Amino acid sequence: MPEASSPRSFQVRTYGCQMNVHDSERLAGMLEEAGYVRADGDEADVVVFNTCAVRENADNRLYGTLGHMRPSKTRNPDMQIAVGGCLAQKDRDTIVQKAPWVDVVFGTHNLGSLPTLLERARHNQEAEVEIAESLEVFPSTLPARRESAYSGWVSVSVGCNNTCTFCIVPSLRGKEKDRRPGEVLSEVEALVTEGVLEVTLLGQNVNAYGVEFGDRYAFGKLLRSCGEVAGLERVRFTSPHPRDFTADVIEAMADTPNVCPQLHMPLQSGSDRVLKAMRRSYRSERFLGIVDDVRRAMPHAAITTDIIVGFPGETEEDFEQTLEVVRQARFASAFTFQYSKRTGTPAAELPDQLPKEVVQQRYERLVELQNQISAEENRALVGTEVELLVAEGEGRKDTETHRLSGRARDGRLVHFTPSGAVDGEIRPGDIVRTTVTRGAPHHLVADAEVHAHRRTAAGDRWEIGARPKTSGVSLGLPSVGAPAPQPAAEQGCAC
């Protein structure tokens, strides 16, 4: 009898936000269910690019990478290249026109089509381009092979109802669709059953959760419900919108022990005039008011943000107002971006697009200020005790410094010395307690001895190379009348 052919290998390369990272976990889960195996090295039979379209350099990066893939495709015609995600949703047929060696193009609304499209492309010996105009299957119905043994993403919604003039995401991800709270919790519980200690609730506008089924307090309730999941030690969420931030969410954060004292809330600009032009439905006073409310409820909360520099028409006075908000808010850190003109957004048609050199100069001033604030805030933590969830791959210099790295409950990155009260080898997924000895702009250092080390089920699973796999949970959008009973989940990518 002829020998059975070996399964085809795959590799998923991800660009962009946490939503894309989680979508890539789903792509990996589907390919595994279809009989593919993860590639051990750089060579794979199928290479999937899960793309981002938020900034202009995303286009250049993808097409440059596809160009570098062409020789591999020429050497191995059986190799398949697939492009999905936001850039695929935007560019569609343009991808195979620019890179005719690409085999499959699929969008944000039809992730589940990938295995079928790959088989169809192999059979027909031609590129398959399939871009759905609206959500076909809610992503939570798809299996997901999780990348981390100790931390997992859980989507509460997809899409966005906002109309920010700089943002292309709503046109690529569609209108907001919410999951039932019970389905979200079923997925959380499934992850915890497999050893996961920390979950991050995801949404393009996560605190608008509930808008589709008419409960504006749904997100606060969901946080409190996560607090009742036995074994779940940390809950985070990203990214909330200031417009939808309600007092009950702050109360839920403060009252629920496993919800981390961390808030990432995009500012985008400190100028009210620019915020209006961006169509951001809040002003700087409102933003700073939320920051104050959070700190009153959780004095040690770490607040981070996103800021865009160089929006069309931004004046020096506008930029100075942004710097002033940064000074008042004293963010733990900030993701700073130079405005990127995206075709199809209202901002792309605005007059007074700023010269690159002006934007660059303002960007450097903002980064300098934020680095100064971050360093001061981190130095203030020297001498304090921190509880760390030991992480994998977070410390680039860990090998040469003989340190390990982990995340504090407030989300700060801490590089620590693994000595002291250590119960055997410290592994990713374990919990340690130590004391901060130095603060730098982007991290903390803890060279004191470890006070306590707790080995965890997540660490056990990391040690044997096991990663959680969750089967899909059905969407079950709310309907009129009492909802039907929802089955528990089976075990198996900010604005």
Image (tube, rainbow, N blue to C red):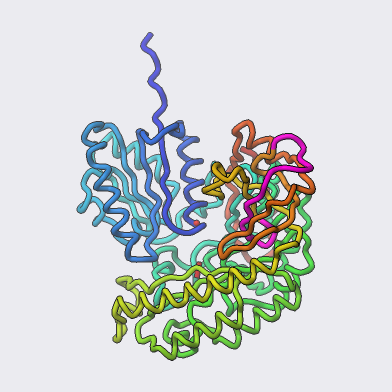
Instruction: Identify the residue at horizontal 75%, vertical 51% (top origin).
Output: 433
- x then y, percent, for residue 177: 53, 64
Res 245 → quadrant: bottom right
Left or right of 76, for residue 468: right
Residue 94 sits above or below residue 71 on the image: below
Start and end of the magenta stretch?
Answer: 408-425
Q: Is residue 89 visible?
A: yes
Instruction: Identify the residue at horizontal 50%, vertical 87% (top origin).
Output: 321
- x then y, percent, for residue 210: 62, 69
Left or right of 337, for residue 479: right
| Magenta span includes 447 | no
- Between 41 and 208, the one lying in front of the other is 41
- Between 252 and 134, the one lying in front of the other is 252
- x then y, percent, for residue 436: 70, 58
Left or right of 491, for residue 51: left
Left or right of 261, for residue 153: left
Instruction: Identify the residue at horizontal 47%, vertical 48% (top origin).
Output: 24
Residue 228 sits above or below residue 432 on the image: below
- x then y, percent, for residue 257: 78, 61
Residue 9 sits above or below residue 161 on the image: above
